[in-house]
Image: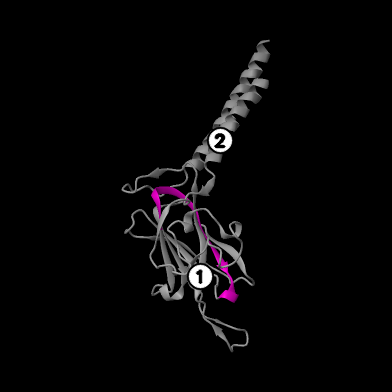
Amino acid sequence: MKRIMIAAAVLLLGLFAITAQAQSSVISVGKSYQLITPASAGYPDDGKKLTDGVFAATAGGVGYGNPAFVGFNKSNANANGDFEIIIDLGSVHTDLSKFEISYLHQTDAGIYAPGSVTFSVADTRNGTYTTVGTQTIVEPASTQINKTTVTPDGPISGQFIKVDIKIRAPITDESGGTTVTPSWVFVDEISIYGTTGATSIPSESIPPQTGDGITILAFSIIGLTAVVMLCLIIKERKLKDID
């Protein structure tokens, strides 16, 4: 029986190692990106801030003066009222699992949470972008840094991630007398999550839309573990019968 337990432990450790490799993690850190709509000259981007892995909350605290933020003014928004950013992951990833932005809400400085954010993906920079999803953002009640996430129903494939951050629509107070037009959106980080160890292929190749491989492999190992354990138990019993 001791041998059975050892064999089972080894197989289960193998299963754990494979599933651990399948954990979702941020794969956008250090990746290049382009601001299609420019940032404000007063709160500029250095080409690294939005994917450097540095969050304002841990690098100077809440407030528009935090250098981790990139400021976007409504005067630079496109015709749809969006600030547009394209991130290049460097190669096509077949298991993109979560898309997230971190932003500031500080109304006393005229900075409001975005109205919504939309993520889209493509295999090539100038290719056809497929919408992953749009998340409408509820305006916070106080000054704070928040994160908003778009999570697809299943794994997504792509190399280029287009982020459309929509400026909030004019806000009318409860009495209906005063209308405030949000002018600023401040973003400190955009995070794209993928499965660690997932397939990454050159951008000129077109990958299949699949993400079930890890799951199938995990269940296969579980089934194999059960079969091996059963065989070991039968063998152990036969040896006892011979004795």
Circle 1 residue = 185
Circle 2 residue = 17
Residue 133 located left or right of residue 66? left
- Using a 10 Å C-alpha cutoff, classify the residue at mark 2 as few (fewer than 14 neighbours), some (14 to 19) or many (20 or more): few
Helix, strand or loop status at disc 1: strand
Q: Nearer the viewer, residue 72 or 158?
A: 72
Q: Amino acid at mark 2?
A: Ala
Check the image and name the residue furthest to the bottom: 177
Residue drawn at x 46%, y 73% is 73
| Region in magenta | 87-109
Helix, strand or loop status at disc 2: helix
Compared to 108, does 241 lie above or below?
above
Quadrant assignment for the C terminus: top right
Q: Amino acid at mark 1?
A: Val
Report, in whole angstroms, how far the alpha carbon at label 1 lies from the one at label 2: 42 Å
Residue 36 located left or right of residue 213? left
Task: Tell me residue 188's x, y (percent).
Answer: 52, 61
